[in-house]
Image: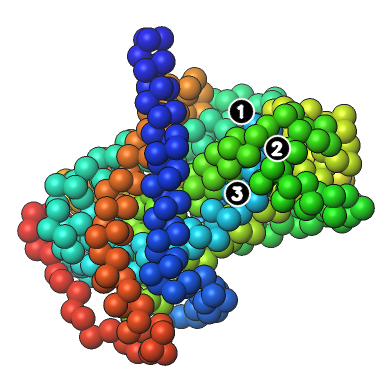
Amino acid sequence: MNSFASVVEGISAFLWGWPMIVLLLGTHIYLTIVLKFPQRKIFTGIRLSVTKDKGANGDVSQFGALATALAATIGTGNIVGVATAVALGGPGAVLWCWLTGVFGIATKYSEGLLAIKYRVKTSDGTMLGGPMYALERGLNMKWLGILFCLFTAVAAFGIGNTVQANSISMLINETYSVSKYVTGLVIAILTALVILFGVKGIARVCGTLVPFMAFFYVIGCLYILVMNYSYLGETIRLIFESAFSAKAAGAGFLGTTVMMAARYGIARGLFSNESGLGSAPLVAAAAQTRNPVRQALVSSTGTFWDTVVICALTGLVVVSSVLAFPDIDHTNGAALTKAAFSKIPFGSLILSVGIVAFAFSTILGWSYYGEKAVEYLGGKKFIIWYRVAWIIAVFVGSVANLSLIWNIADSMNALMAIPNLIALLLLSKVIVKETNKYLWSKNLDETSNEEIPLITKGSR
């Protein structure tokens, strides 16, 4: 078993190494260029995210779809993950993480566009979409869509379920001495109460939980930055210098190189916002929207909030705290985050509530992703069994040792990206055409007249 675990760990490290980083970041930059920098329309996307498209086809509002996607992406990686990147790659990792988010906006935009462009509906009117439908309908590559769904279904039970439940139970056990079994049972019950209502129930809860948790976490970060105000200038200077030179060893940080800063910063940014992984389009397809570009703009704001805002704030908090309090242990991401927040009133409580809320919302968001993958593979008849398995996995994850599961899920998460990136790159002309038609020709309010296909085969 130890040998198998080592092999899996090696595969995971390879998949998330430089080849994947180059592939994802390269796609981000390519789509940014061919789409004429859709990032400049980010505030239009924010406005649309809180605007209802009355009469448009879809199962949930654009905000509901965005909140569900954000629930799945904003997690412990935004808090502990960024701190770990700083601990391993130095302050410069913050800038690389941020740049990944800026360019990733174009990829998340493209994913949302294809999700609407190639979505289908069932006999009861339910919308289905995502990379598998773009591959099947746009490229006649259903076999690759099946692979994407297989990778997604496996990855969901790891990174979106057991790992998140384990983070919650461990935190509550260490902080409040509550049994992991008790915590696991409570999380499983709460999860069941939400996911049994389907995407509308998930979107409703996430639409409330995501703004709440993000607000309090951001307030906590801003409080720390105000407290560390006299160090902010030095913080920003150090982040920029460390990103492009070997000077990251200063100010009490361990010696690092530009390559280390880039690797850990880019990897954390890619992993955090999930741009290019193909997960967010699964819920974007359910959105009520007039045309593909409107939802594309809304989807792109997910990467903006996740990485450009929240990850950047976390990075500034972590680096400024090390400068302000040199005694902080900055060699461990989790310890570094706890130490930074412990310096403010109720900081430990804010951090605990933030991690619990972020992790729980991730469980809800990924439950929908996994469900759509399973439905594509086997039809609606498997959904109820999938939900039961999901609820059981939440409890198991709360009490189990997950090092092997984490690495398996990590590998599947990376493999999800490959079919999705193939769809994005091969369908880039379609994305450009739709963008020119609706966005750059100022027809954003126009309603698409393309008919959404009705699928009748099998039980799907």
Residue 235, position in %: x, y?
80, 49
Q: Residue at x 44, y 66 (%)?
A: 32
Q: Which amino acid does label 1 sit on?
A: Met
Q: Which residue is drawn at 31% across and 59% down?
A: 424
Q: Which amino acid does label 3 sit on?
A: Trp
Q: Residue at x 40, y 72 (%)?
A: 35
Which residue is tagged 2? 246
Q: Is residue 327 left or right of residue 319?
A: right
Determine whether the residue tagged by mark 3 lies in a helix, strand or loop: helix
Instruction: Classify mark 1: residues with Cα within 10 Å, few (<14), some (14-19) or many (20+).
Output: some
Which residue is tagged 1? 170
Q: Which residue lies furthest to the right in this view?
A: 230
Residue 57, position in %: x, y?
30, 77
Q: Residue furthest front?
A: 245
Q: In this view, does 17 lie to the left or right of 186?
A: left
Residue 324 visible, this orientation = yes
Q: Which is nearer the N-term, disc 3 or disc 1?
A: 3
Determine whether the residue tagged by mark 2 lies in a helix, strand or loop: loop
In the displayed structure, 211 sits above or below 51; it is: above
Which residue is tagged 3? 96
Q: Which amino acid does label 2 sit on?
A: Ala
Q: Is residue 333 left or right of residue 229?
A: left
In the displayed structure, 392 sits above or below 40; it is: above
Q: How far apart are marks 2 and 1 (CA)?
A: 37 Å
Q: Is residue 51 left or right of residue 258?
A: left
Q: How far apart are marks 3 and 2 (CA)?
A: 14 Å
Which of the pair 428/343 is nearer the observer? Answer: 428
Image quarter where the C terminus lies is bottom left
Q: Which is nearer the N-term, disc 3 or disc 2?
A: 3
Instruction: Classify mark 2: residues with Cα within 10 Å, few (<14), some (14-19) or many (20+).
Output: some
